[in-house]
Amino acid sequence: MKINIPRSIAGAAIAAVAAVFVVPPAVARAATVRIVPAGRDAFAIELDTAGASVNTVALTLSFDPGAFSVGAVNDGGSVIDLWIVPPSFSNASGTIDLAGIVPGGIVTASGTIATVDFVPANGGGGAISGPALATGSVLLNDGKGTPAPLSYLSAMLTPAPSSSAAAVSAVDTVPPDPFVPEIASDPSIFGGKYFLVFSATDRASGIAHYEVLEVPTGPAENVRGGWVVAASPYLLKDQTLSSNIYVRAVDDAGNFRVVTIPAEHPYRAGQWPGAPWQGLGILIGSLFIVFSIFAIAIWIRKRFRY
């Protein structure tokens, strides 16, 4: 499947993303990011847009590594459609980072952005405080990228002693969750060339890395390179979209899941791959050759008639 996505965001450029979604102006209203319990060993990062439509969320959360460590950050069921910075964490620095967009905007009172599994320090005990908001921004879906006023609420979390530690020490034999890579193009990314976006989750041990393999269709299907370690967005080597694309998500335990994207313009006999208009070109070329032979025959006939 091929999609067009808005401009990418990074640092101060995040405001430019929302500007590509042109909708009637909206009145700025306070959005709220909440940290709420999602089980004894997890909490959810939720968004309340206060009735306004928003299309961009970027957050950096900080936590006390002395109180707990993060086991995984999962985006299954997230209200975010496209990740610019997929959810990630650092137990060394005590941070959780994420940034994503929702084309067309979203209005929600309790939309889950991501779920965080945590491991209490020293086997757990009493309730611990959830992460704090270090930096964050929520942009209105008003065509201007207007920042919405942002508030933050965090709950106390009660871990289950020893249960998380046992889960971490258990052997992980489960592959990453199913995911859907997508082909996209945008004038501001890779000069308008086709690229691949993907993001997977793994609740047990976390995603270690991704790999991509492009296999040409037709006579060249056996001429292939190896798997390439890749990050999203990934610039496709075959810009004709005539190759089958395989994306492999590998978790920290070595388990993996492979997703296939069939070639959008597969090779067909008598055509060059990736160009659906080639059949017409071949027909025109054939007619030109026939016409040329006919013209030469007429010239020869006239030349030697007398």
Image (cartoon, grey):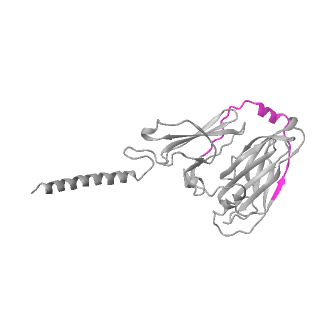
Q: What x and y, as percent, mark residue 116?
A: 77, 44
Q: Residue at x 72, y 61 (%)?
A: 139
Outermost residue to the right: 126
Q: Where 85 sits versus 160, above or below?
A: below
| Residue closer to the observer: 210 or 3 | 210
- Visible residue check, residue 109: no
- Visible residue check, residue 173: yes
Q: What x and y, as percent, mark residue 54?
A: 70, 61
Q: Residue at x 41, y 47 (%)?
A: 272
Identify the image quadrant of the C terminus. Answer: bottom left
Q: Where 28 sits versus 296, above or below?
A: below
Give the left or right position of residue 146, taking residue 155 as reference.
left
Q: Give residue 305's quadrant in the image.
A: bottom left
| Magenta segment boundaries in residue numbering | 151-180
Q: Residue at x 62, y 37 (%)?
A: 257
| Residue closer to the observer: 143 or 48 | 143
| Residue closer to the observer: 193 or 170 | 193
Question: Is residue 173 a member of the stretch shown in magenta?
Answer: yes
Q: Where 41 sits versus 104, above or below?
A: above
Q: Residue at x 77, y 34 (%)?
A: 168
Question: Is residue 24 a member of the stretch shown in magenta?
Answer: no
Give the left or right position of residue 23, taking residue 215 as reference.
right
